[in-house]
Image (spheres, rainbow, N blue to C red):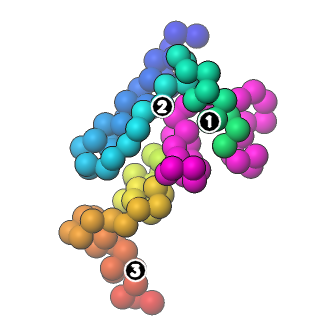
Amino acid sequence: MTSKVYYIKKQQQDVMGFLAVNKIEFEECDIAANEANRKWMRENVPEESRPATGNPLPPQIFNEAKYCGNYEAFFNAREENAVYAFLGLTAPPGSKEAEAQAKKEAQQ
């Protein structure tokens, strides 16, 4: 069990570190110490994104009340330089993501 907790903690730190470095505002919602946060997270993860058994594990990422995805989806978006789109945000000018988006639009 200890390694699983560490794993989840590492994923949370990975997400928060990325957001902080990129100056993306975020609010950390502790579900371990706050029952209301835990309940809200569990109720707002869409049915199709829930595990087959048990409850969704953190980190679960939301933009306000809009569900963005879990850590795996965040990681994939980061690998594809698409985190701003994943979060429902506009990529800042000059960012890799903005450049990739402009190149994609120019090809259409």
Q: Residues within 10 Å of mark 1 (few under 14, many from 20)?
A: many
Name which residue lies at 31% across and 70% down.
Answer: 98
- Does 67 appear in magenta? yes
Q: What secondary structure is marked by label 3?
A: helix
Q: Earlier in the sequence, mark 1 or mark 2?
A: 2
Say which residue appears at 78% left-offset and 30% top-offset: 53
| Quadrant in the rendering for residue 99 | bottom left
Neighbor class of circle 2 (other Cα within 10 Å; few <14, some 14-19, many 20+) is few
- Tag count: 3
Q: Are marks 1 and 2 in contact (CB under 8 Å)?
A: yes
The residue that mark 3 highlights is 104
Looking at the rendered structure, the kind of residue marked 1 is Met
Judged from this view, the residue extending furthest toward the front is 36
- Of badges 3 and 1, the one in the foreground is 1
Residue 107 visible, this angle: yes
Q: CA distance from mark 1 to mark 2?
A: 9 Å
Tell me the quarter of the image containing the N terminus.
top right
SS for callout 1: helix
The image shows residue 89 at horizontal and vertical percentages of 41, 62
Instruction: Mark 3 and mark 2 in contact? Answer it, CB < 8 Å.
Output: no
Which residue does the image show at 61% across and 21% down from the upper left? 35
Q: Residues within 10 Å of mark 3 (few under 14, many from 20)?
A: few
Magenta stretch: give its range: 45-73
Residue drawn at 66 percent across, 29 percent down: 39
Q: Is residue 21 left or right of residue 51?
A: left
Q: Label 2 belongs to which residue?
A: 29
Q: Earlier in the sequence, mark 3 or mark 2?
A: 2
| Residue on which disc 1 sits | 41
Q: Name the amino acid, label 3.
A: Lys
Residue 98 within the magenta-colored segment of the rendering: no
Q: CA distance from mark 3 to mark 2?
A: 35 Å
- Quarter of the image for the C terminus: give it: bottom left
